Image (tube, coloured by chain):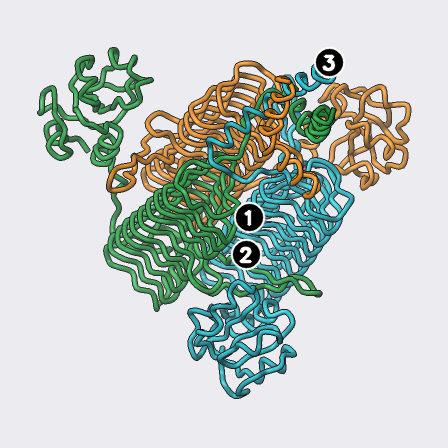
Chain colours: A orange, B green, C cyan
């Protein structure tokens, strides 16, 4: 959707250096931008690309303005400013209200007339779908769910049952919400399934990535608070609570009944064991897992970056001989 | 489904301290229980919540009975007893036999008249669906499959082809069974696909979690024995055999042709390399992987729990200097 | 499809020791083969099974021919030769051209008349589906996609939008391509979504496993080059480039904007952080991740294989006391 630089500057509180009537109609990188494109400079590593950009305008910090060969939108946080402007220029696709003929809606469900149900959607018993909700093709919204206004399910999402979601949530393809938690009691005859009767409670402005799974609670609910961002292929187990504005990169796994604070960050392939509490503002590094309560904000790690196999294998060998080394030192001390 | 305490005590061999005619209609935690709820006390950490519970009855060990302010159902294994009673009070949802009009069944398939095919289900050629099977919305049961009685596919499950399943299996949304194994032969012209012609053979009473994948065998079958429990987002590669009653937490990956014994436990994000044998009763810890045959039951580990990044980084630095330390000790010894 | 040994030998350049008119109609392992089966001997570990095989013929290296009790097809690379012959004997299932009545195709889409759209398929606006493409049941091909000739989507695959694929690609159930990258800008009011407007560009002869996700680029495209093989449950983040003929085992995660060279191999549960470059011919070991640029071909590792928990726990304790050990050595040196 084309918009003028002047309108963008006004709406997002930027100083504009350039012609306010010029319109931008797309976003681009510094290198690929053309005369219709808006771009941004945030990471100093890309500053060398500034001089050759062909963009209509560049969002940047005031300090960088002197070096800009084209129009500049000055803001202290160019990346967040870009995110908001790009949301205007490239809005999510529009949709028509109403249900496709192939959608199957249980007679006890309530679907707002402004909502869109795409082909092959199924809506279960007692479920409520709010205003302007987009339910993409092949998605299954099971029974006893409550979907807040303006939520979007891109395609082939599955809500097994009893999932309540706030407003403006975005759920990517293959997401599974409300599937049974992993509850099993060992007996002499083998595992006995523990019925999982809780639900999933998701706040406002939550985004969950492709093929991520969030299990229902065993008895009480699994909870994802407002503003949480979860990437693809993550696992949130039963009765986990994820605090507001926490973000998890791909392939993060949180085991059952763990409580995570606000504004935490989990790097890719990280995790946490079950039944622990992690306080606000904790960062867990890549391929590392929290094994006990964390009560101090900060960064926590426990992984080694890959190194040449020969060097690593030697290191592992030495690691295995630390005990012998300790004994040798002890012997020297005893002399 | 409401049931009296007397009936529960009789059916599951508990001693009842309280009125046998009182009915329970739901399950709850000690804290959230009301006068219609059944709850349980198994983990001593929750014992302090016992005195204030408002439950109709609490399942507990005989030794805890004196402290119970409400009716008590006494059993040596309160958690397993709870699992079974909860299965009576909160049974899986009932369903009507028959196929929704939108289900597409190949003319060569055989579907029991007691089975339920939900909207947008597809059943492939030569496939047999047994009695009382529930195939949830959007599920695809491909060709040449055989589904035992009383299996349930919650929604959007996919059986690619040649999957044979015993009785009472539960398969959560997004499960993929029988997809091609990862078989590729390197040639000077690039990878050549190795056709994957085996199937998947799954025993009775198996439960597999959301978005987990089980590949078909390259030539012979991939096998999941009776009573196995697999959580979400796990990967079982071609020609793996998982022994009876083994359980895997989320995000476990087992590489091709590995054989796992009975009653093993894999913690979250654990794994095993291919072509090894793991004996019965082995536990693999979180984010650890078995790299060679394991012939002794017990717990196996190889991960470090996360610690503050500064401390960890120092440790990694020291680890990298072990060799220098060894040399210094050698020098001291030589003096 | 039955084929004579003579035809196979001619087509794939083998020397045949045996009757060229014998036909094989299936593939099997050395042990399970019968008189209609073709099998192979590549790994010397299986050579002991050769003497008792009941196969019609065995593909093997010339050096093994003397020990073969049945017909032999001699080739220097028996495994690749088997892969190619098995592709003739067990071709992918045939399909009828045309769309099932339940398939929903946007009027602006172009679907070749030789393509097959299975039940409950959805094809979005402006999408092009090439010749002989098989789109399996429940698959969603979103808007603005371009699917090359002879691609196959087995079932329940989802292409969110703007995915361009070359020829002969194979995409297994639950695959998600073109889902939004994980782009979020932190602000005092919480995360702001960064619109993800790039697409996904996939070359020829690519195979992607079940429930794997490939996100679209933030601005420019995410790229998977020709001949790449990706196993199940992997994650390719926005703006990653995967070089030709690279292969990734299950559960590999590549973070955003990382560039991977040609012919690399990633073992299971491995990964790479974002914004790095990995050169051609690099192998990353199981449960290890690349944390910075790799400029030399070779194998890189950073994981410990699991060992008995008691031994491991002791090792971790010693690792934590290296500093004390260093101090003791220093003290000895100072004496």
Q: Residues within 10 Å of mark 1 (few under 14, many from 20)?
A: many
Q: What x and y, as percent, mark residue C156? A: 49, 52
Query: Image quarter for residue B131?
Result: bottom left
User: What residue is drawn where x is 48% and y is 41%?
Assistant: B252
Q: Would residue A152 be visible to someone looking at this image?
A: no
Q: Are marks 1 and 2 in contact (CB under 8 Å)?
A: yes
User: What chain does badge 2 belong to?
Assistant: B
Front in this rendered view, residue B111 or C332 = C332
- Is C266 positioned to the left or the right of A108 in the image? right
Residue C335 is labelled as 3
Q: Would residue C6 be visible to someone looking at this image?
A: yes
Q: Residues within 10 Å of mark 2 (few under 14, many from 20)?
A: many
- Is A120 positioned to the left or the right of C287 in the image? left
Residue C250 is labelled as 1
Query: Image quarter for residue A18?
Result: top right
> Which residue lies under the disc numbered 2?
B182
User: What residue is drawn where x is 47% and y is 28%?
Assistant: A273
Does C74 appear above or below A111?
below
Does A245 appear above or below A233?
above
Q: Residues within 10 Å of mark 3 (few under 14, many from 20)?
A: few
Disc 2 element: loop
User: What residue is drawn where x is 49% and y is 62%?
Assistant: B218
- Could you give the CA–CA distance between mark 3 and mark 2, rounded to whole angstroms? 61 Å
Quadrant containing the C terminus of chain C in the rendered view: top right
- Could you give the CA–CA distance between mark 3 and mark 1, rounded to whole angstroms? 54 Å
- Could you give the CA–CA distance between mark 1 and mark 2, rounded to whole angstroms? 9 Å
Disc 3 element: loop
- Is B30 positioned to the left or the right of C164 in the image? left
Residue A48 is labelled as none
Q: What x and y, as percent, mark residue A160? A: 39, 39
User: What chain does badge 1 belong to?
Assistant: C
């Amino acid at each position: 959707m084309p918009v003028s630089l002047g309108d963008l500057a006004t709406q997002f509180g930027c100083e504009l250096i350039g012609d306010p009537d010029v319109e931008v109609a797309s976003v681009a990188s510094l290198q690929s931008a053309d005369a219709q494109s808006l771009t941004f400079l945030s990471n100093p590593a890309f500053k060398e690309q500034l001089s050759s950009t062909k963009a209509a305008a560049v969002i940047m910090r005031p300090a960088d303005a002197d070096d800009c060969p084209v129009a500049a939108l000055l803001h202290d946080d160019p990346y967040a400013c870009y995110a908001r402007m790009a949301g205007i220029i490239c809005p999510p696709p529009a949709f028509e209200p109403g249900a496709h003929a192939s959608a199957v809606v249980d007679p006890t469900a309530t679907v707002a007339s402004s909502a869109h149900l795409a082909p092959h959607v199924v809506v279960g018993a007692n479920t409520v779908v709010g205003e302007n909700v987009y339910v993409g093709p092949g998605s299954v919204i099971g029974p006893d769910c409550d979907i807040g206004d303006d939520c979007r399910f891109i395609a082939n999402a599955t809500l097994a049952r009893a999932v309540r979601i706030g407003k403006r949530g975005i759920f990517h393809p293959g997401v599974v919400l409300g599937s049974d938690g992993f509850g099993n009691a060992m007996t002499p005859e083998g595992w006995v399934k523990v019925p999982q009767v809780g639900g999933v409670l998701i706040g406002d402005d939550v985004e969950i990535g492709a093929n991520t799974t969030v299990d229902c609670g065993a008895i009480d609910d699994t909870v994802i608070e407002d503003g949480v961002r979860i990437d693809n292929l993550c696992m949130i187990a039963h009765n986990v609570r994820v605090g507001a504005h926490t973000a998890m990169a791909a392939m993060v796994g949180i085991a059952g009944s763990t409580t995570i604070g606000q504004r935490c960050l989990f790097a890719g392939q990280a995790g946490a064991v079950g039944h622990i509490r992690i306080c606000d503002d904790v960062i867990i590094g890549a391929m590392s897992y929290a094994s006990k309560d964390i009560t101090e904000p900060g960064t926590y790690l426990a992984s080694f970056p890959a190194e040449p196999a020969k060097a690593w294998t030697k290191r592992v060998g030495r690691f295995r001989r630390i005990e012998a080394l300790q004994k040798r030192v002890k012997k020297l001390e005893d002399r």
